[in-house]
Image (spheres, rainbow, N blue to C red):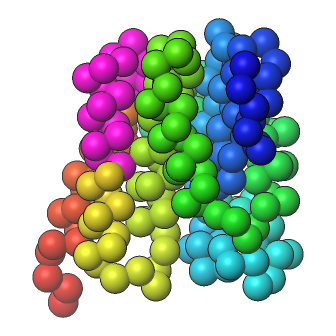
Amino acid sequence: MRTKGKIAAYQGLRLAVFSGVIALSGCLAPAAVPVIGAEAAALESGKDKEQFREAFREGRFRYKTEMSESGCPKREYALSEGILDYAESRPSDGLEKVIEELTEIERDESNSDEVRAEAIYHKGVALMYQGELAKEMVDEERQALYGKARSSFEKLRDEFPQFHECAVDYHLNKLDKLANKEVQPQN
């Protein structure tokens, strides 16, 4: 098995990447991407690591709360504490590297369907929450991220329908609401 920086082998493929952190573990229950808060997005450059860590923890809590209230089975969004701890320690090299790693895994057809599905799901969540929580982002950039997230979730639904069905529906629904919110005039 190929290892690359943050990728390690253990009972199948286990991948750890930042903010958008995932654990892919062969046939084990899937993990999920933690959400970083708006404060964390602003601090992604690593200017203040402790503030980043606090915001990351808050984002993780918000993600868990939101998903636990979604009605989806926990196995579709379970968090890996070891992977999250790794993510917390990487405040400066951000989301772009995560998405690159996830895209590589997604495209590598030698990976199992489960591993590829996990990569697609986590990439979609990372893109969606990056757009949702980065307050300094202009609307066009945010909409572009939402579009990429939607593409990831639709690909997962179409190509790997047996994985993350409830969570994918939940996120697509949320993206619809966010898109409608963006286009409504503000009073």
Query: Residue 25: x, y in percent?
Result: 70, 20
Using the image, determine if residue 91 lies above or below residue 107: below
- Relative placement, left or right, of 102 versus 55 is left
What type of secondary structure mainly makes up the magenta span? helix
Residue occupying the point 58% across, 44% down: 101
In this orientation, does residue 67 appear? Answer: no
The N terminus - image quarter: top right
In this orientation, does residue 138 appear? Answer: yes
Q: Number of labelled discs?
A: 0
- Relative placement, left or right, of 131 versus 41 is left
* Residue span colored magenta: 149-166
Query: Residue 32: x, y in percent?
Result: 60, 37
Residue occupying the point 30% across, 25% down: 157
Query: Residue 84: x, y in percent?
Result: 77, 46
| Residue 147 in which image quadrant | bottom left
The C terminus - image quarter: bottom left
Residue occupying the point 60% across, 56% down: 97
Using the image, determine if residue 89 lies above or below residue 104: below
Query: Residue 154: x, y in percent?
Result: 27, 34
Using the image, determine if residue 109 lies above or below residue 125: above
Residue occupying the point 47% across, 58% down: 129
**Is residue 9 shown in magenta?**
no
